[in-house]
Image (cartoon, rainbow, N blue to C red):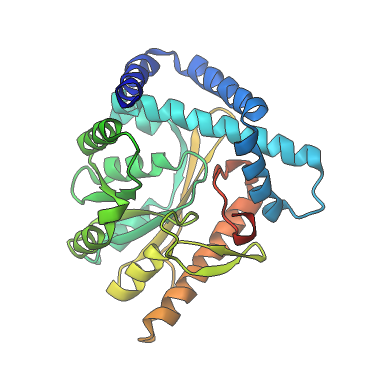
Amino acid sequence: MDKLTLWLYRLAIWFVPRLPERFGYWLFARVGDCAFFLNTGARRTYEKNLAHVLGADAPPRESKRITRKALQNLMKNYFDLFRVHRLSADQIWAQLDSVTGLEHLDQAIALGKGIAGGSAHFGNFNLFVHLTALYFQGKHPIVVPVERLKNPGVFDLVTRQRAAQGIELVPSDQAARVLLKKLRSGAILGLAIDLDPTRSGPVVNFFGAPAQLPDGAAALAVKFQAPLILAFIRRLDNNKCAVTIEPPMELERTGDLARDTRAALEKIVARMEYWIRQYPEQWILFSPVWEEDK
């Protein structure tokens, strides 16, 4: 099975870049439609997450519309994932409709303490990592912790592909010591802020209910005086992306690490709530988030 999965992945990264872009997005959106009708487990999980965002009184039709759109956006992300290694720098920049806030990265990296960067599973979130790597052109390491894929062959191939693009993937079981070392050397970290697969983060109030969320970005920024910057990327109807890089967060550093980390995490949560509430179909997290849904 591992060999078959690796073969299918190799086929995808060979075949998908050869699809015309407009047709590719259309095709993968139709795959999202199929997932909406056939993958009832993923749909139910997403609708439970969405209920926390929209509220209990949201019309079922609206919930289903957003869920279907989110699955389309998720599949379009896979289209981009399978072809990004074949895109030139100019082609990647052409994927962007607008980019706001690059000056925040410049000002933050000039401090010499690295950047604790965070983003949610929102829009074409992988594109921000590629954008950052292109923008700094190898001057600063870009490091992203990820869960190990079940297939070691696919994981090794993905890791090599990203390394060729200036992005270092670090398995989450090794991330703690590696991220600390990299941040101290001035690296830019790309950290998830809406999903805690290790279940080691604190439980906080998220859209009015308890949810266990990762506090890695908050803890690293507080403890090591690194700027904490969030970015959110929206996929537009024309499949270009609008990137917003927010200013570094103003963090409390009282000397009480636990208290200050939680305060920073609560600020992160507030920004996530703002963006997800404004554009719920862009939030493409299909894993349970809230404690009551696990």
Residue at left offset 51%, top offset 14%: 23
Where residue 82 sits: x, y (%)? 38, 26
Instruction: Please provide percent x and percent y for residue 142.
Output: 26, 49
Residue nearer the viewer, 34 or 95 = 34
Image side of residue 97 versus residue 155, left or right = right
**Observer able to see residue 159:** yes
Q: Residue furthest front?
A: 1
Q: Quadrant of residue 218?
A: bottom left
Q: Find residue 89 and report its horizontal and vertical position in percent.
A: 29, 31
Residue for point 44% across, 81% down: 259
Who's the residue at 47% across and 32% down the image?
77
Q: Residue drawn 44% across and 68% down?
A: 249
Residue 252 in sight: no
**269 is higher (above) or lower (below) than 243:** below
- From what the image shows, is residue 80 above or below residue 179? above
Classify 38 as above or below 49.
above
The mark tally for this picture is 0
In the rendered image, which quarter contains the N terminus? top left
Left or right: 267 as drawn, with respect to 181: right
Occupied quadrant, residue 9: top left
In terms of depth relative to the viewer, which is nearer, 148 or 86?
148
Quarter-wise, where is residue 250 in the image?
A: bottom left
Looking at this view, is 66 or 12 the one in front? Answer: 12
Q: Is residue 11 above or below residue 133?
A: above
Q: Quadrant of the C terminus?
A: bottom right
Q: Tell whether 4 sits left or right of 230.
A: left
Residue 190: image location, x then y, percent: 35, 52
